[in-house]
Amino acid sequence: MTLHSQINSAYKLLTEQLNQAKLLLLHPASRYRSVLIAKLVNDPAIPVFYYAMGPDDLDINAFIAGLTHDLMNQHPTFGRHLNMLPASVFENPEDSLDILLETFTIELAEFSDEPFVFVLDEYDRSNPADDIQKFVERLLDWLPPNCRIVINSRTMPRLPWIALIARGDALVLRDHTIVRDEFYRPKADEVDIEVFALGPGYVLQNGKLVNTWEGHLPRLLLFFALDQPIITRSEICRAFWPDLTDEQAVNVFHVTKRRLHKALDTEVLIHEDGFYRFNPDIRVYYDLDEFTSNLLQGRNEEKDYETRLAAMEWAVKLYDGPYLQGHDDLWAQERRKYFRFGFAEAIDFLAQDWLKQGRKEQALLLYLKALKESPEREDIHRIVMQLYQELGRRSEAVAHYRALAHLLEQEKREPEPETQAVYEQILG
């Protein structure tokens, strides 16, 4: 294959995957990533808005200011909503993150009514900025439905890629292939430790359960370190000890890190260039790597149906319970939602297979299992109600809706119009 055809193949994959995920990363090891960005920016068929991170993008305020300045040249009205925000928002941006996200989303929505791409180039310049990473991660929840983000970076960005991929929000492209495994580290035939995050969270070393943690924090620190390619000490301290002063949190962190290293009798976290990361010399099996890899295999429409079905079945088997079940730390709760979404997707795939065989009872049982993990999924509630009705269990369909309505009432919400319509159809 000639260089020209290789680039065209990689670009074809990029443009195809814009329809599949909100966020695309051109893997740092991609040979053609800069060429692909140039090709994308100059493609007359795709509206693109471009921002290259600069050396001053070291916090969210500098990022918003630089972004607004550059994008005004591409869309003259960009920034008018951001510029109207009170100064207090920018004085304490972490506490005003939702306001910033909502306003920024309004700005993006005014770019175009048609599908468009927002490129963040040279993203590695933002690596030291914890608040920019949180902003970009949270932006995916606010993103206009016609907007896609493409990131180009010389290093693996500090985002929770495994979680984002599991939820279906992100994909990592390496030239003309989608990265479907080995997200942060290569697989090993033999491993030093086995880490299981789905369920209560435990670790095996040489086949034996590790129970010498001296408290739960060293064990949780291990899971936190595996969540992203690199992390900062400040990020760790804010996640684990938000109520302590910086000095107090740093002291507790070092104690926790020493206990982690002692429990596994090795240096688990290494410090390089101002960042911490999981020691690449440790051969590790991580259940979330396998879980997410199987989700990607199941989503891969180029594979035959039986291969996809087997992958989704294995993803469901790997799901031994919610992520770090029993731990209420805010960061763990946030991650839990991502993997629950992936689990519900795998359940849906298997349930649809039962429905193709006319096995509605088996499909209903699977959907009820999914709702135990993701009770907020009204789309699944609607399927359950319809299955109850089709099985001649109308009273259970009505009872299911009323239980859902009661649950939402406690949150001062009503069922979605689509859910109410299904209920009315059942009553009618």
Image (tube, grey):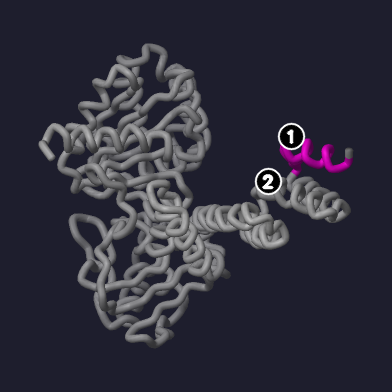
Identify the residue at image location x=20%, y=38%. 33
- Picture coordinates of residue 360, whole percent (x, y): 71, 56
- In the picture as drawn, the residue positioned furthest to the top comes out as 76
Vertical position of residue 243 compared to residue 76: above or below:
below
189 and 133: which is toward the camera: 189
Secondary structure mostly taken by the magenta-highlighted segment of the chain: helix
- Mark 2, secondary structure of its residue: helix
Q: What quarter of the picture does the C terminus occupy?
A: top right
Q: What quarter of the picture does the N terminus occupy?
A: top left
Residue 284 lies within the magenta run: no
The magenta span reads 412-427
Q: Residues within 10 Å of mark 1 (few under 14, many from 20)?
A: few
> What kind of residue is marked 1?
Pro
- Picture coordinates of residue 423, whole percent (x, y): 81, 42
- In the picture as drawn, the residue positioned furthest to the left comes out as 2
Q: Residues within 10 Å of mark 2 (few under 14, many from 20)?
A: some
Relative side of 100 to 403, left or right: left
Identify the residue at image location x=45%, y=54%. 298
254 and 206: which is toward the camera: 206
Q: Earlier in the sequence, mark 1 or mark 2?
A: 2
Residue at image mark 2: 378
Relative side of 284 to 242, left or right: left
- Picture coordinates of residue 258, whole percent (x, y): 31, 76
Q: CA distance from mark 1 to mark 2?
A: 10 Å
Residue at image mark 1: 417
Asked whether residue 193 appears in the rendered view, the answer is: yes
Identify the residue at image location x=58%, y=55%. 353
- Picture coordinates of residue 130, whole percent (x, y): 35, 47
